Image: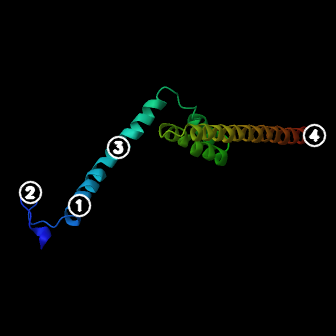
Amino acid sequence: MKHLIKQGPGAGIEPGFPQQKKNRNDFKKKIKKLLPVTDFFYVWTLNQNNMSQTPPKTWLLESILVTLFCCLPFGIAGIVNASKVESRFYSGDTEGAARAAADAARWTKIGFWIGLAVAILYLLYIVFVVGMFASSMSSY
């Protein structure tokens, strides 16, 4: 009972753990309240640092055009990679953004050249078939 005989603030409170535990819980609550703000300012400062740089080319428009007019699977791969470029750049991952831009460019170019080759082969096939049909009709 010796520890309960106390005068002044905190009189009658057992020294040590209960009061310290309460203060620790208050501190944890304050930290939890501050963490989202801290994370926001951390991301904001990262974004401010990235503002001096420009994001890499996204290849999004080219990927959409390749998807519509040339080769659907490669165009979709280009769109998926192109959509990752800006989000990675503004989250601070400039290397990942550059890698996604390079992947988008690769898939878009592959889709374009395959689409062009298929179009040329189709055109040659049509010319050949029409030529065969025209030559067979002229002999009658």
The residue carrying mark 4 is: 139
Whether residue 133 sits left or right of residue 32 in the image: it is: right
Q: Nearer the viewer, mark 2 or mark 3?
A: 2
- Circle 3: element type: helix
Q: Which mark is residue 20?
A: 1
Q: Nearer the viewer, mark 3 or mark 1?
A: 1
Q: Nearer the viewer, mark 2 or mark 1?
A: 2
From mark 2 to mark 1, how far is it between C-alphas?
A: 15 Å
Q: Amino acid at mark 1?
A: Gln
Specify which label sits upstream in the sequence, 4 or 3. 3
Q: Nearer the viewer, mark 4 or mark 2?
A: 2
**Residue 46 place in picture, x, y as percent:** 45, 36
The residue carrying mark 3 is: 38
Q: Nearer the viewer, mark 4 or mark 1?
A: 1
The residue carrying mark 2 is: 9
Q: Amino acid at mark 2?
A: Pro
From mark 2 to mark 3, how far is it between C-alphas?
A: 35 Å
Return the residue found at the far left.
7
Specify which label sits upstream in the sequence, 4 or 2. 2
Specify which label sits upstream in the sequence, 3 or 1. 1
- Circle 4: element type: loop
**Residue 3 place in picture, x, y as percent:** 14, 68
- Circle 2: element type: loop
Q: Are marks 4 and 2 in contact (CB under 8 Å)?
A: no
Q: Are marks 4 and 3 in contact (CB under 8 Å)?
A: no
| Crowdedness near tag 1: few (<14), some (14–19) or many (≥20) residues, C-alpha within 10 Å | few
Quadrant that contains the N terminus? bottom left
- Circle 1: element type: helix
**Residue 136 place in picture, x, y as percent:** 90, 42
* Residue at image point 48% right, 40% down: 91
- The answer to which quarter of the image holds residue 8 is bottom left
